[in-house]
Image (spheres, rainbow, N blue to C red):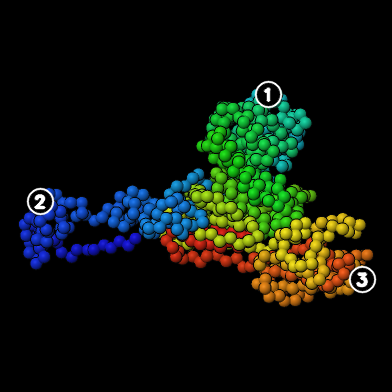
Amino acid sequence: MLTLLVACTAPFPCPPDQLLAADGTCVSGGSPLDTAEPADTARDTSDDTGEPPDTDDTVPQDADGDGSTADEDCDDGDPQTFPGAVEARDGRDQDCDGYVDEDVPDLLFDLADPRHAVWGLGANVWPDADAWVDPVTTLNGRLVRAGLGPVWDTTGVDVPLGGGASDYDAYVASAMATTGFGSLDDALTTSAEIDRLGLDLVLLQWEAPSEMEASGVLRSAYVEDYAHLVAALVGHLADNGIDVPWLEVTNEPDGSWNTQVYPSDYSALIVAVRADLDARGLIDTRIAGPGLSTLAQGGASTRFLDALTPDAVAALGAWSAHGYDDAYANGDGVTVFRDAVADFSARTREVDPDLPFLLTELAAQDPSYHGVATESPLTCGDWSSTEGYGVRMLTYTLLALGEGASAVLPWQAADPDWGGCWGSFGMVDVEGTARPFLATLAALAQALPDDARLVGPDERDPAMAVAGFVAEERFVLALANPTSEPRTRTIGWTGADTLALTSSVGVGGASYSEEYGFEDVTTLAFGPGIWQDTASAEYFADDDARLGGAGEAWIILGDGTPITDFTLDAWRWSGIESGSFAVEASEDGVTWTPVAVDEAVESGSWDRVTFTPPAMPAGCGWIRVTWPTLDPEWALELGGAALDLQPGPLGVPDPGPIGAPRTISVEVPAESGLVLVLSR
């Protein structure tokens, strides 16, 4: 809205009780331009009756404060309705153009209705190394999670079973006086870096001494002992100047790899820890729990939440859990994680909606990626070193924040150099090399303002993870597209004036592979003369996944995404000469160009042949394979194919004014993400 300010160069020429006539003279009473009706038709601050000024004497009002006056606004009682407003899908005319629900954006954000506070990102760190400092700094970290305490079974100090709080004070002091992992020296070194960087600590107590367990499970008789131990650890750290804002009393109590704790015992444990902390005056240390290994798999969240007594809920300062749910997926990890974090968030809100939610461990372990099996980071595989992993981690982070998480802490900042395989989850590997997902998450973290609050779209995006964050003059919009297709969205917002795009960062967009098996030929484009081989079991164990072809039959692979390389696996009778297949490439799916291929042959009664191109023509998005005309009994059979795909250079919107005042259109390429900052 344009406002014009008019400056007066001279005072009004008539006395207060007179009016200015058209001929420039001052006259008493009504204006000479008024008619004899009792309304002020001249709009000159009076009417013919001598009554006080009418309402039509004033500048038109803006009753709802949306910047449009009553004579412009089609609903001056609704601040979301005015000329230029963004349409919503609600059967109303928001932009006052006489049309309803036209040009509704794909995703609509109400910037005047933020949800929970978003503290930011952090990471899990190891206390005996400093390799975590650089990645956490790059991530603009807000919290770190660390186990600042020893592995109790390695200290050689006797556990005072059945003892009181003072007995465990002495035990912890003696155990941490020893050298090695988890010593007080390690804790002081790590704490000094945490303080220097201005981070909050989430203290992790890994597990109980084995004397308190039976077959790896905390014995109910020692719940009080374990509570004294945990509180004594926090007290000992506090006595040495180490602040503990957040505490997880044990790691993943639903699992048997550390100390498993039954749900009812966990409820009693956090009540006892809270009481011991309060007795020590450590009322500012808040317990985050239950810290389960998954958000929703196996029903653990239901069992633990149902077991919490009112006293246990009151003992908690935050909900916490770990996001490894996609380990149970097989190529559909995004859907599994989306459902799991929504389920956990909904269940915890039912118990206590006012507690913040900390996702204290997050990693991606989905064993299949667009049909391609990957090597899990759990076994030191290279999945975590791909751009796809970076996009997956951004996707999960946005989904978690969108479902109520205040902070997300990836597992982990840096891989420990302890020899052997300790996983390859680090943002930095043991050689100090940063993995791509550090930059991916940093693009989001560095854009978030300190006092950000989440704003979600009016409805979930079916394919992408999308979240918005607002604070004062800034709207941060983050989108992650983990699919193999580009996605275009129009984004609209209400509750704020016109915004300008001030920065944009793109992440991901690297190549990925698409594998084709032929169990279901209906998903492919193929020409006449193709059949599925189910009649040669004596030769092939996996006949149903093999296609035969003859009579110039053909099959097309690809979806238009640029193909950088491919392999084709085929079988042929050894009497058939090389060069039998014809392979062609196309940019448009209509015009085809021959592609030379090398053939690697594994000889036998039927030769197994692997076809690969020495070079690919630029820009081709489809591959066509054509069979020669042969006796069907001896025809070539195609067993599988893999295409290496490259979505192309990642483009981001240019900063600057936005065409429509409150909408922006963005394209997010396959396997990529965008972080946009819009400001007043």
Q: Secondary structure at mark 2?
A: loop
Compare residues 106 and 129 and report the one nearer the observer. Answer: 106
> Which residue in the rendered view is the most extreme toward the left?
28
With 515 as the anchor, is 291 left or right in this view?
left
Q: Locate residue 484, reporting x and y percent.
A: 65, 60
Which-is-in-front pick, marks 1 and 3?
A: 3
With 404 as the anchor, is 438 left or right in this view?
right
Q: Is residue 50 above or below residue 647?
A: above
Q: Tell me which numbered mark, 1 or 3, is placed earlier along the sequence.
A: 1
Q: Quadrant of residue 679?
A: bottom left
C-alpha span from label 1 to label 3 = 83 Å
Which-is-in-front pick, marks 1 and 2?
A: 2
Residue that numbered label 1 is attached to: 163
The residue drawn where x is 70% and y is 50% is 366
Residue 206 seen in render: no
For badge 3, the amino acid type reads Gly
Q: Tell me which numbered mark, 3 or 2, is placed earlier along the sequence.
A: 2
Residue that numbered label 3 is attached to: 575
Looking at the rendered image, the quarter that the N terminus falls into is bottom left
The residue drawn where x is 58% and y is 41% is 345
Q: Locate residue 339, reporting x and y percent.
A: 62, 45
Residue 21 seen in render: yes
Q: Which of the numbered marks, if any, corresponds to residue 50?
A: 2
Q: Secondary structure at mark 1?
A: loop
